[in-house]
Image (cartoon, rainbow, N blue to C red):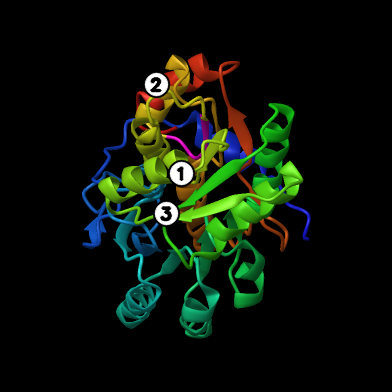
Amino acid sequence: MNRTTRTFGVIAAAAALSLAACSSSGGKKATDSAAGAAGKANTPRMTIAMITHAQAGDTFWDIIRKGASMAASKDNVDLQYSADDDPAKQAQLIQAAIDKKVDGIAVTDPNTGALGATIKKAVASGIPVTMFNAGEKDAIGLGALGYFGQDETQAGEAAGAKLKAAGAKHVLCVIQDQGQSQLEARCDGVTKGLGTKVERLYVNGADNSDVTTKINAALTQNSAIDWVMTLGAPFALDAVKALPNGSTAKIATFDTNADLVNAIKSGKVQWAVDQQPYLQGYLAVDSLWLYKTNGNTIGGGAPTATGPAFIDQSNIAKVAEFAANGTR
């Protein structure tokens, strides 16, 4: 595994910025633009396409978009956002950005088999590419300037170790979008860190009723399940609603949003693995601007880690301050 490289100067600059960027609905598939934001950098206007695998309704992506929009505002960038959780359609969005001859592309890669060739095509056409959130192991090989995110297997191992320390015996790992490599890697890591078999449950993350119904059924059928590990904040909240009467199962999750922070504060969810999505979105855009305007690259040929870290009762009060802004 490549050693991750943290670029403290850039991260500190990101943290110092105002957190007032506007959010938009989670996982929209329509192209969005931050062109109206007033640029602060005295550099030529450029267009950057951000293309993700966001699933409709997943508020995690709102936080990424806030970070990206803040960087775009600072850097005088026209940010054009689009998303599709179907890998074939996401590849079409990348191709559309190539055809537009954008100045840079920031992209997630949950399925290199479906997306890798198009990402390579963008690089071959002379468009600089950064990758973030998904695709860490393939990013540099595909020609990306850098990758911003967490090692999902490593994050899963840390979560599994935390579950083991809490005495977990039978963990249910809930996967909201089958076929995404980074989600499978999380459950793989949980299994390794826990040191025992983990049951996997596949749900349709775009349908809250499907999530709650299937989690409830799994817990009803197997009362030995003592922990539910979800892979996104909205699904942890669904799990809270899905607990059968009398169930003592506890809930933990990957990723956060404002409602999830409140659930941790109240004790309904025990903790969350935080990969800092705001920072991922910010660095994915800002690194392209730095490359275009000053020839800089971030990471030294290795991924730049934005996580994992844990949010629990020990630090939830501080995180809640930023979650209220929609940035954590």
Amino acid of disc 3? Gln
Q: Circle 2 sits on which residue?
A: 262
* Visible residue check, residue 30: yes
Secondary structure under tag 3 reads loop
Mark positioned earlier in the residue sequence (2 or 1) = 1
Query: Relative to 112, is 161 on the left or the right?
Result: right
Q: Quadrant of residue 322?
A: top left
Question: In front here: 191 or 148?
Answer: 191
Mark positioned earlier in the residue sequence (2 or 3) = 3
Residue 54 percent location from the top left of the image: 36, 57
Q: Circle 3 sits on which residue?
A: 176
Q: Circle 1 sits on which residue?
A: 221
Amino acid of disc 1? Gln
Q: Which mark is residue 256?
A: none
Residue 170 percent location from the top left of the image: 63, 40
Secondary structure under tag 1 reads helix
* Visible residue check, residue 65: no
Q: Are marks 2 and 1 in contact (CB under 8 Å)?
A: no
